[in-house]
Amino acid sequence: MYSIIGSGFGLYGYLPAIIKLNKKGVVLPEEYKKTILARPELKEFERDIIWAKNKADALKKTTELIIALPPSIQYSTVKKIIKETKIKTIYLEKPLAPTPEKSKNLLKLLNLNEVNYVVGYSFLYIDLQARFNDLIGQKDDIYFNWFFMAHHFSKNLKNWKRYHDLGGGALRFYGIHLIAFLSLFGYKNVVKSTLIEDNQNEPYIWKATITGEGLPVCNLKIDCRSDKEVFSLSNLKLGHSNIEKDPFDVPTKELSNFDRRVSVLMKTLSVEICSQESLKLKYADINELWAAIEKATISI
């Protein structure tokens, strides 16, 4: 049985993913009903939900929990969950915490307790690995670009996703996806890393050059305040190669009414928990690369 903490992405992202996968039932607190009924694409799921009187009651009835909260409160939330419930598996959103140091503390807390966990690093579950392996095989510098207009900029929202110190911005909120992806291939060394911001603590461009033993240099650039939509992997031999202007899968007809990330979340929820030890090592490597990048980063 699943439950969800977080009435934003937890509901419009993870709820459809759970139900479309025909997973076990979903238990939600009554306070989320108003949000679900207000969203046309979610109203149909009311019949699939087991309603509990409050969050504490919902947690008593579940063994698998999705936490989709701001990174600044994930540690305290997880600590409370571990102490007060019998939940066996937790799905967490990235970044785990506002900084890699705090993220490391959360990983340590999870590892010390008998709880399985999966972190939603979406780029680990999109169809990019074969393409990237082809580029690695050519031994030429790789250029990895992702340009788009973030929702908080297009709507001028002052939420945490905008601010670097809260775990948001071009590096910590968006760049962490690329960091996770590169870590998977063995990238570990940071040549340079730069944040560009007009307002302090609101970086909208992140540029970095990262290397790894036996790997070609990878040059990254994220612009989350761009008027263009570009998502490309390229080198000088192959030239420029766009991938749908967006890194996430184009939804099938069945998923067309939902957030475009639902198909990726379905893959995240399908991760084999039995490989928990390898997952732990993977998440530790991701966090180490993130820490190295943060140490090398300058802001201009």
Image (spheres, rainbow, N blue to C red):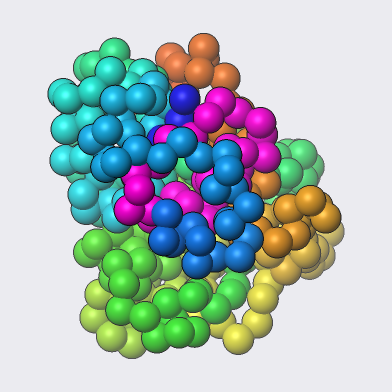
Left-right relation of 187 to 93: right
Is 258 on the left or on the right of 92, as rendered? Answer: right
Nearer to me, 38 or 271: 38
Q: Is residue 119 visible?
A: no
Q: Position of residue 159 (x, y in %)?
A: 31, 72
Query: Left or right of 106: which side holds 288?
Result: right
Q: State the residue at coordinates (73%, 44%).
A: 127
Residue 6 in the image: x percent, y percent? 35, 51
Residue nearest the observer in this picture, 293 or 147: 147
Q: In the image, is residue 42 part of the stretch drawn in magenta?
A: no
- Residue 206 visible in rendering: yes
Nearest to the observer: residue 55 or residue 114: 55
Rendering coords of residue 14 (x, y %): 52, 45
Residue 284 in the image: above or below residue 121: above
Location of residue 56 by image quarter: top left
Q: Residue at x 67, y 46 (%)?
A: 263
Q: Quadrant of the C terminus?
A: bottom left
The residue depicted at 29 percent of the width and 67 percent of the height is 160
Q: Is residue 45 above or below residue 234?
A: above
Q: Residue at point 67% right, 76% down?
A: 229
173 or 40: nearer the eye?
A: 40
Looking at the image, how many numbered discs can be counted on the residues?
Answer: 0
Image location of residue 23, percent across then percent down: 60, 28
Q: Is residue 58 above or below residue 209?
A: above
Magenta highlight on residue 30: yes
Residues rendered magenta in the picture = 5-32
